[in-house]
Image (cartoon, grey):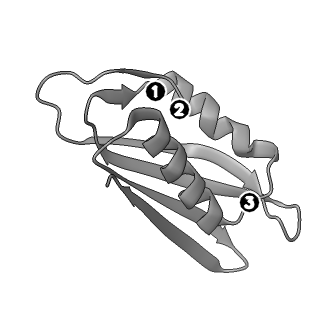
């Protein structure tokens, strides 16, 4: 994930993609997710093209929705050191069940 200096006055950044796919680690079937990332930047912001490529990297990975939310939150926190980051992963229904997982990382 690439970053750039935070512009003056920015308090919160929200980025969302509905083009995220991963593989179910149990069945190997594709899962489609919407990922929403909300964070309070300190000195750096996430660059959007690098985020898109990062999110596309999950296409061939087996991951539970909950693990995906946690990994993305940790990776964003490591990349830009925000005051806090919350990641919401909403998985499109499969088998009649919609799944939403949230992960949050707070800077100490």
Say which quadrant the C terminus sits in.
bottom left
Which of pointers 3 and 1 lies earlier in the amino acid sequence? Answer: 1
Q: Secondary structure at mark 1?
A: helix
Report if the CB atoms under discs 1 and 2 are less than 8 Å apart.
Answer: yes
> What numbered label is drawn on residue 48?
1
Q: CA distance from mark 2 to mark 3?
A: 18 Å
Q: In the picture provided, is 27 more to the left or to the right than 32? A: right
- Pick the residue in front: 33 or 12: 12
Q: CA distance from mark 1 to mark 2?
A: 5 Å
Identify residue for label 2. 51
- Pick the residue in front: 98 or 64: 64
Report if the CB atoms under discs 3 and 1 are less than 8 Å apart.
Answer: no
- Pick the residue in front: 92 or 1: 1
> What numbered label is drawn on residue 21?
none
Q: In the picture provided, is 61 more to the left or to the right than 28? A: left
Q: Position of residue 99 (x, y in %)?
A: 57, 73
Please report the residue visible at 48 percent of the width from the left and 40 percent of the height from the top: 78
Please report the residue visible at 54 percent of the width from the left and 29 percent of the height from the top: 1
Outermost residue on the front side: it is 108
Identify residue for label 3. 63
Which of pointers 2 and 3 lies earlier in the amino acid sequence? Answer: 2
Please report the residue visible at 63 percent of the width from the left and 79 percent of the height from the top: 97
Instruction: Examine the rendered structure and indicate whether residue 79 appears above or below residue 108.
Output: above
Q: CA distance from mark 3 to mark 1?
A: 23 Å
Q: Residues within 10 Å of mark 3 (few under 14, many from 20)?
A: many
């Amino acid at each position: 994930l690439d970053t750039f200096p935070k512009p003056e006055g920015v308090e919160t950044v929200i980025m969302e993609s509905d083009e995220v796919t991963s593989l179910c680690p149990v069945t190997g079937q594709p899962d489609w997710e919407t990922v929403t990332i909300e964070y309070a930047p300190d000195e750096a912001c996430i660059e959007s093209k690098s985020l898109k490529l990062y999110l596309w990297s999950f296409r061939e990975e087996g991951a539970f929705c909950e693990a995906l939310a946690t990994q993305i939150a940790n990776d964003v926190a490591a990349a830009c050191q925000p005051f806090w980051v919350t990641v919401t992963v909403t998985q499109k229904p499969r088998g009649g069940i919609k799944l939403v997982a949230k992960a949050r990382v707070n800077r100490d």
